[in-house]
Amino acid sequence: MFCTNCGAPLTPNARFCVTCGAPIAPAPGGMGSPARSGGSPAYSNAAGAASSSAWQAPAPVPQAPATPAPAPQIQTPAATSPAPAAHGSAAILPSYLQTVASRIGQAPQFIPEAGAYLLVADQRGALAVQMHSYFFFAANDLAGYAQMQVYAEACMAWARKNYEGLPRGMQSGLAVYPVMLQHPLQPDALAYVKQIPDKHWAAFELPVLFDPMTGQLEHLDKTPVWGFAMWRGIKASARMVLTGSQG
């Protein structure tokens, strides 16, 4: 073994060179090297042990707050389109009803089964018969024969079913007026109101067409044989109530 500074030979385990006095670095595995056992340090690393005992789990990394789910969108219903404005006779019907109601002294009521408004008047007929008059009102500028027939039958059926009063035929009778407002008057509808209606027990049916723009009033011209004495008063009541005319 030689001195790394001057090259002089060294004695075993020398710490300094006797020639130049330079310190001798310990050889690997010599006295200056720590003893090893099984490849692991034989000494205890106090600093490392202290560090190990003081070790703590790292603080959790704060998580970004979860983005809230978007609130459900409320679907606003589309605005309902307004009902189409009435035209022709249908537009005149409300004011005409008020005029007729003032003559009778009664407010109209809507009858779904007939699709019409109803005004009821009690009048004294021929031979001292108390006549219960049911005036139904609807408006249809395009109604023809078939529509008038369905309308008149519905009005008659409702009146007979809901009639209130003395039994018909015992100084008491029923007059039903299915009135249709129409402009201009349709030939087919006119043909329907001009025909003789069906016969009913102590009940009279007089379908009527009325043009609210001209005041034209049309109904049966002939006088049926059955109930002959009553028909004149029934027709006169139609003119008085619907036009305000006594003639």
Image (cartoon, rainbow, N blue to C red):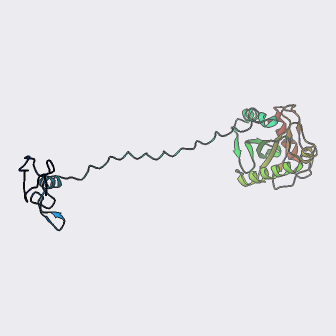
- Please indicate whether residue 223 sits to the left or right of residue 237 in the image: right
Furthest residue in direction bottom, as rendered: 38
> Residue at coordinates 38% horizontally, 45% vertically from top-left?
65
- Please indicate whether residue 57 sits to the left or right of residue 199 in the image: left
- Please indicate whether residue 221 sits to the left or right of residue 26 in the image: right
Compared with 244, 132 (above or below) is below
Q: How many marks?
A: 0
Quadrant containing the N terminus in the rendered view: bottom left
Residue 57 percent across, percent down from the top left: 24, 53
Residue 93 percent across, percent down from the top left: 77, 36
Q: Nearer the viewer, residue 125 or 27?
A: 27
Residue 108 percent across, percent down from the top left: 70, 40
> Residue at coordinates 79% horizontally, 45% vertically from top-left?
128
- Please indicate whether residue 176 sits to the left or right of residue 55 in the image: right
Q: Nearer the viewer, residue 222 or 233?
A: 222
Quadrant containing the C terminus in the rendered view: top right
Give the quadrant of residue 41.
bottom left
Residue 84 percent across, percent down from the top left: 74, 38
Q: Nearer the viewer, residue 33 or 72?
A: 33
Give the quadrant of residue 117.
top right
